[in-house]
Image: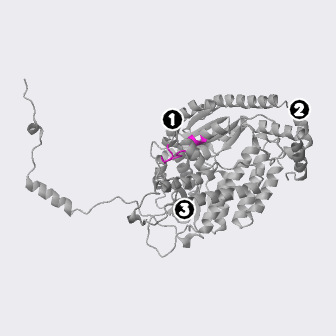
């Protein structure tokens, strides 16, 4: 039998005291080495007149409006071209492995653009006369690594001194420190912040209006033509500091000229998910919104304003949790009002929504109001703790519960990059939501950049079910209210105000078609409806 090993046998031999002493002295003599990001030349105020700020990653409307607002403040600004498959290839070449396809698309888009500039300018001229502005965050996923991927890619592509400006989600613009008497090139003053917020609010309203009109347009392409005119009008308004409300009323008239047929039963499809993948109108999600419209659906997008409200409400939740904390080290005295910060954040959120509705009213109330983030958080809380931050947090789950309770869409699609951690976590929770609301149609879709056929085939199968639900809803409304659809069509034909793209009516049903048919039926057969019809003729959309 082998002898049992005891602790003494297993203990390693002791090192000599003098050897340990020499090693300690050696370590103490070394200068501590800390990681530091490479020093980068700052973008300074004196360079504004000669340096162009590049940016991208939003919708066409948002980007054009941001360009107009920033040019009105004296900046040279250009938006990057729409990312395509070639940009994805370039991104995969210069990025690390394992990144999500928004990284590949956006990084590749920048590098590809710089490579094209290199055909006409030297590397030194590009590095001197261009900077790139992007969003940054310490995210729970690969989004937190975007900044380092941009820097790595431009260096590997041969633009070692190209400057990246980081616009932090939690406030401020992050630039690498540098000793200079000159001011920062990007000044976050009141005019800059207001211009950015106006661009976001107006961009959401333009996109929302297009999504409401385009599926029902009589002349194909008329809505996109009107959209182009409206974007140019409002970008010029922001650049030249004209009246926004007056320009929005002009935009309403432009959209009103688009003739529509609202008697068609089309499924309402809400798109949510990871920020970039769900928002983009590019190859990044295979032009998903355009494809849905071509397939006969009406698209309901999450406004960018909702995301801004989410950032504010997330901090409001933190302020709520700190109500009872007295922390002298942080400067909070015993007599401090624990509600002060919370009330300030609440006031900011309500002010933002007030301006959204002010602009929405100028545009004719066609677009619905944003959903209160407090409502979304409370609806989601039983499934997804609202105190859990990161990524889209409670918004995806809250949106699905809201859709199930309020019947706002026939189908909800969550679009995210392959392996997106926060959105995939939400998908796991959605299974419980769907068991509690069995009538909900929910489809999670992942994009990798090169799986378009699989992506759209999965969507098409569920879209067929959504179309059936929309048709069943229309049939039910016609049957229960004894509606003659031919009578409705004749009435609409003789009243052109109801064919206007900006005719606004209450969505009493999930689908626009069913709501419109019921609205017209009341205008034909009820006293109050006939009165409203006369008023509509008097104040016809124009």
Residue 187: x and y in percent read: 56, 68
Above or below, 413 relative to 243: above
Q: CA distance from mark 1 to mark 3?
A: 40 Å
Who's the residue at 75% across and 41% down the image?
507
The residue identified by callout 2 is 486
Q: Is 284 or 130 nearer to us in this picture?
A: 284
The residue identified by callout 3 is 131
Q: CA distance from mark 2 to mark 3?
A: 59 Å
The single residue placed furthest to the right in the displayed view is 494
What label does residue 428 carry, if any? 1
Looking at the image, is mark 2 or mark 3 nearer the viewer?
2
* Circles 2, 1 touching at the beta carbon (< 8 Å): no
Above or below, 401 relative to 53: above
The single residue placed furthest to the bottom in the displayed view is 181
Q: Is residue 391 magenta?
A: yes
Is 218 displayed left or right of 17 in the figure? right
Can residue 90 be spotted in the picture?
A: no
State the extent of the magenta-drawn residues as a range: 385-399
Q: Is residue 189 magenta?
A: no
As helix, strand or loop, the secondary structure at mark 2 comes to helix
Instruction: Using a 10 Å C-alpha cutoff, classify the residue at mark 1 as few (fewer than 14 neighbours), some (14 to 19) or many (20 or more).
Output: few
Above or below, 64 relative to 435: below
Looking at marks 2 and 1 on the same chain, the residue that comes earlier in the sequence is marked by: 1
Who's the residue at 72% across and 57% down the image?
359
**Quarter holding the N terminus?**
top left
As helix, strand or loop, the secondary structure at mark 1 comes to helix
């Amino acid at each position: 039998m082998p002898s049992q090993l005891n602790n003494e046998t297993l203990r390693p031999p002791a090192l000599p005291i003098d050897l340990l002493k020499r090693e300690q002295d050696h370590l103490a003599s070394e200068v501590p080495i800390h990681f530091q990001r490479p020093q980068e030349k700052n973008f300074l105020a004196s360079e504004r007149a000669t340096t162009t700020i590049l940016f991208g990653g939003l919708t066409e409307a948002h980007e054009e409006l941001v360009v107009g607002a920033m040019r009105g403040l004296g900046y040279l600004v250009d938006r990057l071209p729409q990312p395509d498959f070639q940009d994805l290839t370039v991104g995969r070449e210069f990025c690390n492995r394992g990144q999500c396809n928004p990284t590949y698309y956006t990084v590749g888009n920048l590098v590809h653009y710089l490579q094209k500039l290199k055909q006409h300018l030297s590397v030194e001229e590009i590095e001197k006369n261009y900077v790139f502005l992007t969003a940054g965050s310490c995210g729970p996923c690969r989004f937190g690594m975007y900044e380092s991927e941009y820097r790595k890619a431009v260096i590997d592509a041969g633009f070692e001194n190209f400057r990246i400006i980081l616009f932090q989600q939690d406030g401020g613009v992050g630039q690498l420190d540098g000793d200079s008497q000159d001011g920062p090139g990007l000044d976050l003053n009141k005019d800059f912040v207001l211009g950015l917020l106006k661009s976001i609010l107006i961009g959401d309203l333009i996109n929302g209006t297009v999504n409401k009109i385009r599926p029902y347009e009589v002349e194909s392409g008329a809505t996109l033509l009107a959209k182009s005119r409206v974007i140019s009008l409002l970008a010029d308004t922001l650049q030249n500091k004209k009246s926004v409300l007056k320009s929005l009323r002009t935009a309403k008239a432009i959209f009103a000229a688009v003739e529509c047929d609202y008697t068609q039963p089309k499924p309402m499809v809400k798109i949510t998910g990871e920020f970039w993948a769900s928002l983009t109108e590019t190859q990044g999600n295979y032009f998903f919104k355009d494809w849905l419209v071509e397939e006969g659906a009406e698209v309901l997008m999450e406004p960018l304003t909702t995301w801004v409200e989410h950032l504010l409400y997330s901090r409001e939740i933190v302020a709520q949790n700190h109500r009872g904390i007295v922390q002298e080290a942080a400067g909070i005295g015993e007599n401090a009002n624990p509600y002060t910060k919370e009330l300030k954040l609440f006031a900011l959120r309500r002010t933002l929504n007030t301006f959204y509705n002010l602009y929405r009213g100028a545009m004719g109330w066609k677009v619905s109001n944003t959903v209160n983030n407090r409502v979304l958080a409370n609806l989601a809380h039983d499934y997804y703790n609202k105190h859990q931050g990161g990524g889209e947090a409670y918004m995806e789950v809250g949106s699905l519960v809201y859709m199930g309770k309020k019947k706002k869409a026939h189908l909800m699609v969550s679009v995210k990059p392959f392996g997106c951690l926060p959105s995939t976590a939400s998908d796991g929770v959605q299974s419980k939501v769907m068991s509690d609301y069995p009538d909900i149609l929910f489809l999670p879709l992942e994009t990798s950049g090169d799986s378009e056929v699989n992506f759209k085939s999965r969507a098409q199968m569920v879209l067929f079910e959504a179309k059936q639900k929309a048709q069943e809803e229309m049939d039910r409304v016609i049957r229960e209210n004894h509606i003659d659809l031919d009578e409705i069509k004749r009435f609409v034909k003789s009243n052109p105000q109801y064919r206007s793209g900006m005719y606004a009516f209450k969505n009493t049903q999930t689908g626009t078609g069913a709501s419109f048919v019921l609205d017209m039926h009341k205008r034909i057969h009820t006293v109050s409806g006939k009165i409203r019809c006369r008023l509509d003729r008097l104040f016809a959309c124009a």
